[in-house]
Image (tube, rainbow, N blue to C red):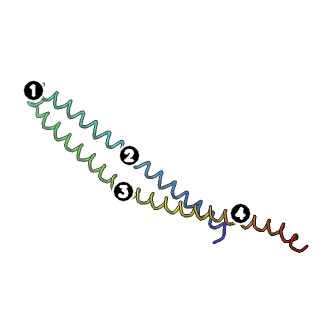
Amino acid sequence: MKRAHLSALADITNLQLELSQNALASLLSEERRLRAMLADLSRDVERGQKTLLSDDSYKAIRGDHNWNQWVGRSRLALNLKLAKLLARKELAIKEAKKAFGKAEVLNKLVDDDKMDRKFLCERASLDALIDPMMLR
């Protein structure tokens, strides 16, 4: 493969790696946000239970029932979003690993090519110095 093609391919692969890492970072950020929302909901439930136990007027208007239904729906919705996100995260991790592997291989090939070219250049320089001496 030509040096320019190899270098260009390595650049493209490194960009793909960066894109996959950015996508994964975005999913991780969204996961943290959803987990924080679930934690907030759990804290709200604790506070709400204390309020419901201390104030009987909520029971009279079925506020406790409505509260519990809302909490259940909210928790279910957040958990569903989190489950979908975790599935997408799993795929993103696989893609990031794949992109990392490709980038590593191509970067190694580019480095090896540079070393080969350096060696050939140094050898040609040495040959240019030695050849005239051998002709004497």
Per the model, the C-alpha gap separating discs 4 and 3 is 42 Å
Per the model, the C-alpha gap separating discs 1 and 2 is 39 Å
- 92 horizontally vs 11: left or right: left
Kind of residue at disc 4 = Lys
| Label located before the other in sequence (1 or 4) | 1
- Please name the residue that numbered disc 1 is placed on: 56
28 vs 103, nearest the viewer: 103
Identify the disc placed on residue 85.
none
- 135 horizontally vs 53: left or right: right
Per the model, the C-alpha gap separating discs 3 and 1 is 47 Å
* Disc 2 element: helix
* Disc 3 element: helix
| Label located before the other in sequence (3 or 2) | 2
- The answer to whether the residue labelled 1 contacts the one labelled 2, judged by CB atoms less than 8 Å apart, is no
Q: Residues within 10 Å of mark 4 (few under 14, many from 20)?
A: few
Q: Residues within 10 Å of mark 3 (few under 14, many from 20)?
A: few
Identify the disc placed on residue 90.
3
- Please name the residue that numbered disc 2 is placed on: 30
Q: Residues within 10 Å of mark 1 (few under 14, many from 20)?
A: few
* Disc 4 element: helix
- 50 horizontally vs 126: left or right: left
Query: What residue is drawn where x is 31% and y is 42%?
Result: 35
Per the model, the C-alpha gap separating discs 1 and 4 is 85 Å
As drawn, 99 above or below 63: below
| Label located before the other in sequence (4 or 2) | 2
* Disc 1 element: loop
Q: Nearer the viewer, mark 3 or mark 1?
A: 3
Q: Quadrant of residue 121?
A: bottom right
Kind of residue at disc 1 = Asp
- Please name the residue that numbered disc 4 is placed on: 118
